Image: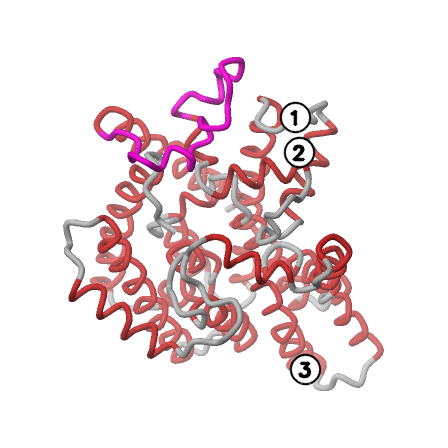
Amino acid sequence: MIKKIVLLFLLWRVFLFVPIIIAHQFVKYRNGYEYTSLNHFLDKSQGLISHFMLSAWANFDGVYYLLIAAKGYTVNAGFFPLFPLLLHAVSVLFGSLIAFDLIQYLTALILVSLGFLLSLIVLYKLIKLDYKDNVAIFTIVFTLIFPTSFFYAGIYSESFFLLLSIASFYFARTNRWFLASLCGAFLTATRLVGIAIIPALVSEFVKNEKSLLKLKSLFLFISPLGILSYMLFNFLKWGDPFYFIQAQGAFHNERSVDSIVFIPQTIFRYINILTTVSPGIFEWWIALLEISTFSFVSIMFFVAWKKKIRISYILFALICFLIPTSTGTFTGLPRYALVLFPIFIALALVKNKFVKIAYSVIGFSLLMILLALFSKGYYIA
């Protein structure tokens, strides 16, 4: 079965070059957004990675992960440290200390690809603890054809976030609490929403061990160490342990960083956008993508609950979902939804073939379109 997963991964990875090639032939880079491209930061001596088949994988956030890995933090605290630290360590091992050089770039691409492949393998093993083989395979396929799955191939932290979250649950399910909590600690150092693993592991511990009053429960205190370490770093460097939250406001994405915005307010805002802004504007379509993603994920949470998917999985995914959606915008949600693995399990458990076929056709089509646009400087998520 591992061979089948590897084959699915390779087919997916090779296919992702198709929309990039098509976009290169027919779409110009978005005017005024050249700064989102890796090529904006390169000089002529770095010709190989400036090739359109390579450079697109570092568009938008990828550039900053490469910069942090080579030069450390300046004011970009909104990017959590685990991925750039790992990239820095492996790049140095291969002799690279410079941002955007070939060794660093290829190292980053290989790391995210290996991370995602391992994620799929561990996801298969995790699902097999409860379900038959076909459910596990369908879950993997539905993950691969999600419209923004190309971010797993880009220089982003998504692949490691997925790997660490699934590994944490797998170790918890197999009663290896130290490893589960260690993965949890790394997870909370990967992205802010990684803190969702803390209550999820507590829930899983209580379900498995029937009580928190056991010595092994002390392992659960390891999980917060990742974000606590980053908070200490923020305090020492910027004088504010929560500076990484305020730094989110510098991304100009209309995200509230100092108060919670109720989701109905955000839904009303999106309805207003879709009914007053012209569909001739690209941002109208992104707003439609964001509200559609919100609706799809919400429905799949309901399906996951009805299908009795493990409560700890749903709890984790729900917190990961509620944190960004409670900031007054659904910006980024099409990417954030990638790591909500219970929704793909739920979809695999749906018996209606029409639903699965419709998801596959729509997901596959949007994957091609969105990757083509992303490669040309159009913000997707």
Q: Nearer the observer, disc 1 or disc 3?
A: 1
Q: Are marks 3 and 2 in contact (CB under 8 Å)?
A: no
Q: Are marks 1 and 2 in contact (CB under 8 Å)?
A: yes
For the residues labelled 3 and 2, the Cα–Cα distance comes to 42 Å
Q: Which residue is mark 3?
A: 206
Residue at position x 47%, y 74% in the image: 309
Q: Is the residue 221 above or below the residue 48 in the image?
A: below
Label 3 SS: helix
Label 2 SS: helix
Residue at position x 75%, y 63% in the image: 225
Q: Is the residue 212 above or below the residue 367 in the image?
A: below
Asked if the magenta segment contains residue 43, the reply would be yes
Residue flagged by tag 1: what amino acid is it?
Answer: Ile
Q: Which residue is mark 1?
A: 98
Is 260 situated left or right of 241 in this image?
left
Residue flagged by tag 2: what amino acid is it?
Answer: Ala
Q: Residues within 10 Å of mark 3 (few under 14, many from 20)?
A: few
Which numbered dot is residue 70?
A: 2
Magenta span covers which residues?
27-53
Residue flagged by tag 3: what amino acid is it?
Answer: Val
Asked if the magenta segment contains residue 36, the reply would be yes
Q: Is the residue 168 above or below the residue 80 in the image?
A: below
